[in-house]
Amino acid sequence: MARNVEIKARIDSIEALLPLAIACADGPAEAIAQDDTFFRCAIGRLKLRVFADGRGELIAYERPDAAGPKTSDYAITPVADPDALRATLARALGLGGRVVKQRNLLQVGRTRVHLDRVAGLGDFMELEVVLREGERADDGVAVAHDLLRQLQIAPSQLVSGAYVDLLRLKAEGDAKGTPSDCRAQPAKKPASNAALNAFASESTCSAQARAASSSGARHCALAPNSINASTLAEPLCPALRS
């Protein structure tokens, strides 16, 4: 499996952070519409990602829920018919949730910088530092820390868990009439590498979402947050929360 060091943070707006991110980046931002469907599974997480052009990717990954940088082991398989695969996996495994977002991707050296507008949640920044084969996770953590400083991200902005978890928590809070905060949540520490915690990403992709994003490739384009959160967050199987 390939490995990343990843970190996610809540931001006030993509527009506010974009100039800093562009100043660090190797090139312009690329706008990518993504529709992720999660499935119940016994180990880690499994999601089917569909792009605006109809392509799909099946992504399996394991990552601890922690507010600071954490390692993610993942495998990606291209999918020619994502709609058919979604139906098959939903029948076999059951649905675990859905995340629809407009992602603005920038490359900073070996680090992917994501500025995400997530339907039902708001705006986030995510870093993925690609680790070389055999490289220590601490090396990727150091890269992430340096970039966080350049982007002026405070420890209080860091978020644990995946977007699908935050959507579920928000839906539960809305049902109880208690607003939820998408910032850092208490989570289990990774089994190893204490440095990762030192510093305190479904159902068929709608035609509307595909049309809205198809005109924005290869430049920074922000899609309106027009999808109701209650239709996106489905209950998660406990096995999905590693």
Image (spheres, helix red, strand yellow):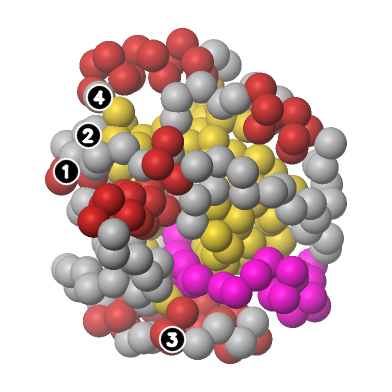
- Mark 3 vs mark 2, CA separation in Å: 31 Å
Quick one: SS at disc 3? helix
Q: Earlier in the sequence, mark 2 or mark 1?
A: 2
Residue 137 location, quadrant: bottom left
Q: Is residue 45 above or below residue 134?
A: above
Quick one: SS at disc 4? loop
Q: Earlier in the sequence, mark 4 or mark 3?
A: 4
* Residue at numbered disc 1: 239
* Residue at numbered disc 3: 155
The answer to whether residue 57 shows anywhere in this view is yes
Q: Which residue appears at 71% of the width and 48% of the height?
A: 223
> Which label lies toward us, 4 or 1?
4
- Position of 104 with respect to 149 (left or right) is right
Q: Are discs 4 and 3 less than 8 Å apart at CB?
A: no
Q: Indicate whether residue 98 is drawn in magenta.
A: no
Q: Are discs 2 and 1 less than 8 Å apart at CB?
A: yes
* Residue at numbered disc 2: 41
Of residues 107 and 202, which is closer to you in this image? 202
Q: Which residue reaches farthest front?
A: 177
- Magenta residues? 1-26
- Position of 18 with respect to 159 (left or right) is right
